[in-house]
Image (tube, rainbow, N blue to C red):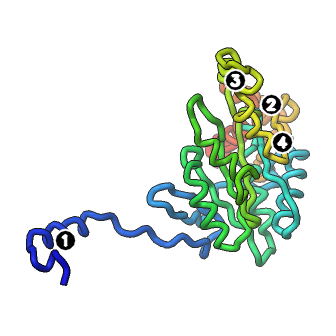
Amino acid sequence: MTSTDNNPLLQRIADALERLAPPPAPPVTLDGADAFVWNQEPGHLTPVPVVSRVDLSLLIGIERQRDQLLENTKRFANGRPANNALLWGARGMGKSSLVKAIHAAVNEGRSDRLVLVEIHREDLVTLPILLGYLRNSGRRTILFCDDLSFDSGDASYKSLKAMLEGGIEGRPENVIFYATSNRRHLLARDMIDNERSTAINPGEAVEEKVSLSDRFGLWLGFHNCDQAGYFAMIEAYAASFNLTLDPAELHARANEWSITRGSRSGRVAWQFIQDLVGELG
């Protein structure tokens, strides 16, 4: 007999607390989908039935980066040694699109399909928990973090650093980590300069944070495209939608669109084509 059995008040309190308690989180599983988003609270993977992505053939102007990441991913899928990858550089040039497109391309025709799991930067502190789930699942997984960077005072990079070889366990054999960032060293330049100027030993002040990017075995740089590259993207997108607009008119309208946006990139090209397709029906 418990103490609450002899005390109705305690029993009522216990019952009330039980009703207020959140339901237990569903068990983490990688069954039923090839893509998931990690939710820190309550700590489970949400399946993504349809991933927002473009076909690999439509990613124009980044062929070298495409080929390197594709080969690295194929090695990983086939159980061979492969590197964690950092895709860094200009905005809108297809970094995250490339990761998602390669995931789909490698899975085509495979029975042992790769899993793509996205983790948000603010959830990196829960990496050890997520890695435990992924390690136990047995499925080969691309762990993906988009727009990765760290601000002053942010210590969540330490969880990532430990996973990228620094910890006792390291990353599980069935997990590879791909990240995109606008910063090559994942830190803003003014942060690095500030650390150096206020440290007793300037050389060591930022070594721990900068060394994080060194733990990615594969660095892929993405740079702003010129006008010729921009027009090549426009033409590829137009062909994929079977648009029959005169090339001169297509280029003129695409150029005007880029001027209003103040830049030329794959993202700007895609947005222009989406607008054009909507206009032409």
Image spot of residue 196 (x, y percent): 70, 19
Image position of 271 (left or right of 237):
left
Q: Amino acid at mark 3?
A: Ile
Mark found first going from the N terminus, 1 or 2: 1
Image position of 120 (left or right of 144):
left
Q: Nearer the viewer, residue 209 or 232?
A: 209
> Pointer 1: what residue?
15
> Pointer 4: what residue?
220
Q: Amino acid at mark 2?
A: Asn
Q: Nearer the viewer, mark 1 or mark 2?
A: 1
Marks 2 and 4, Cα distance to the nearest angstrom? 14 Å
Please name the residue shown 64% across and 59% down the image. 117
Image position of 116 (left or right of 225):
left
Image spot of residue 277 (x, y percent): 67, 46
Marks 1 and 3, Cα distance to the nearest angstrom? 54 Å
Image spot of residue 138 (x, y percent): 69, 73
Q: Quadrant of residue 62?
A: top right
Q: Nearer the viewer, mark 3 or mark 2?
A: 3
- Provide the secondary structure element on which disc 4 rests: strand
Q: Amino acid at mark 4?
A: Leu
Please name the residue shown 54% across and 64% down the image. 45
- Provide the secondary structure element on which disc 2 rests: loop
> Pointer 2: what residue?
224
Looking at the figure, which quarter contains the N terminus? Answer: bottom left
Q: Are marks 1 and 2 in contact (CB under 8 Å)?
A: no
